[in-house]
Amino acid sequence: IPESLDRKYLYLCIKKYVFLPQNPKTVSMVKDLVKEGAVEALRKCFSSRMEFGTAGLRAAMGPGISCMNDLTIIQTTQGFCHYLEESLGNLKERGVVIGYDARAHPPSGGSSKRFASLAAAVFISRGVPVHLFSDITPTPFVPFTVSHLGLCAGIMVTASHNPKQDNGYKVYWENGAQIVSPHDKGIAKAIEENLEPWPESWNTEEALKSPLLKDPYQDINTQYFKAIQKHCHHRDINKSSEVKIVHTSVHGVGHAFVQSAFKAFDLHPPFAVEEQKDPDPEFPTVKYPNPEEGEGVLTLSFALAEREGATVVLANDPDADRLAIAEKQESGQWRVFSGNELGALLGWWMFRCWKQQNSDAAAVKSLYMLSSTVSSKILRAIALKEGFHFEETLTGFKWMGNRARDLLNQDKTVLFAFEEAIGYMCSPSVLDKDGVSAAAIAGEMVSYLAMKKTSLSQQLTAIYTEYGYHISKNSYFICHDQDVIRSLFERLRNYSGKKDSYPTECGRFSISAVRDLTTGYDSNQPDNKAVLPTSKSSQMITFSFANGGVATMRTSGTEPKIKYYTELCAAPGNSDVTQLKKELDDLVDAIVKDFFEPEKNKLQPKPE
């Protein structure tokens, strides 16, 4: 190993690592890399530890401290357990829940089930009761279990829709929502202080026989589907509906659970895409196991729909916390709705059903809907007209889930929350996005609209006609160079060469306000200080334009992407969609050219 790598340090790291794990596959992988002199690969594995953040962990499975493997799972869980012991006095009475998806990485011996068992062993070694699901489960079942059983915390082992080699470790607090700061920093510190495996942390065999281990699978299956039935309002229509729906779980966990959700709503079972309905960690039929990528993931679904005469396709991502929907148009083409369009449809539907159940006019004053700051402002427009409250949070369901819990604790009704990345919270039973309940609720909405001889597309137009068109266009660039990302955003903060001199125009478009949630600057506030929480660890700037356009540029917390989210909000009555779309296209072109500078910064566009 070259001297420039500080070979003594690297050697000690590798030596310590090789003698710590009890997984021969990762040990063998490291030894092979050393034999081959694969310096770059070794550097990647051992140079820096995975960062634990509010999203927990997300990384490739493999050897070394930068990857998801038996050792790093044990270390992470030891830190989390220690933090819970320090933070909550009744951890040993209440316990935790652990769930997992179907991911596996044969070369390193890593799998979600294996990682979940190791996490359980760590907690049990400290006398903490563990509710470990005996089989794969959707991510929403973990926060549901935390709330339903009153547990201290939850862990879900999943990488959601990431590439097949990845895995993740997602953490929920006792309030049923994902952790937010300062818990992430406290857990990260506790991990660093508990790196040496505890004596019983490896002993999954004994842990799985422990009286402290419980299996919540059957009980939670029953209670979850009972809970979501509160949101079934048209059972008779569901029973008699002739509408045909196709569902795909994209090789993930969703199939059985969505079938059960449809049954709970008395909906006819959706046609399942045979090639994709069973869990398969190889995701063999798709390039990316992410229904947000659109038509490429839905090709088999469209083919099945054509054969069966179905007009609607529902798709979950592999851990079933997201939902995509497509509808066959009169032209014969398929329309894949964006996350913002589905947010408009589901928000309208949830409010319509609530209104029918609540005759008291004053009740609307205690009603709330939430969305993230990069999502469409359509809920704000509906709220203004209908009289309920709308609130915006930072990006991610960790913020919406925690805000929802605050509101519920004040006896408010949180009816709906969504983010543009096809995430929907349609029931306060789960304070996170939930693609299972959303699928059943969408199925009922489709059945109701079919009974009224209308389609999802027609209803979306009706929503925009009543509340104002909200046209959005979102995409991203891929960039692996953190220095490039940093300089791109710093240039926008010092546009005229002075500190905090943000752009005042972009092409022909005049900028009316700037909010920077990395630095805490907001030109719309009297003291120029942002109201929403800020974070120096991620980049995020929002530009408001004089023409009613809004554009946010931000980095992803889990992928090497710089994302942009743009929307043009028109007043009710302005229905010239062609002109609105052209105006937004021109705005996006100007932002890409002037703010992203893709050629200069060598940014890769989103793959088609």
Image (spheres, rainbow, N blue to C red):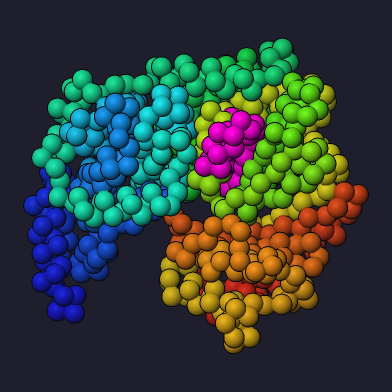
What is the quadrant of the C terminus in the image?
bottom right
Q: Does the rendering let one see residue 328? A: no
Q: Decide which of 67, 522 is in the foreground and name it.
A: 522
**Residue 12 is drawn in which quadrant?**
bottom left
Q: Relative to 562, say whether 103 is above or below.
A: above
Left or right placement of residue 225 versus residue 123 in this view? right
**Residue 141 is drawn in which quadrant?**
top left
Left or right placement of residue 370 versus residue 402 in this view? right
Residue 559: x %, y % from top left = 45, 57
Q: Decide which of 577, 280 is in the foreground and name it.
A: 577
Q: Does the rendering let one see residue 33? A: yes
Q: Residue furthest right?
A: 573
Residue 251: x %, y % from top left = 45, 35
> Does 367 appear in magenta?
no
Residue at coordinates 25% horizontally, 51% vertically from top-left? 191
What is the quadrant of the N terminus in the image?
bottom left
Left or right placement of residue 363 versus residue 176 in this view? right
Residue 434: x %, y % from top left = 54, 34
> Does 409 appear in magenta?
yes
Residue at coordinates 36% horizontally, 33% vertically from top-left? 152
Residue at coordinates 32% horizontally, 21% vertically from top-left? 215
Residue at coordinates 78% horizontally, 55% vertically from top-left? 569
Query: What segment is highlighted magenta in the picture?
Result: 401-427
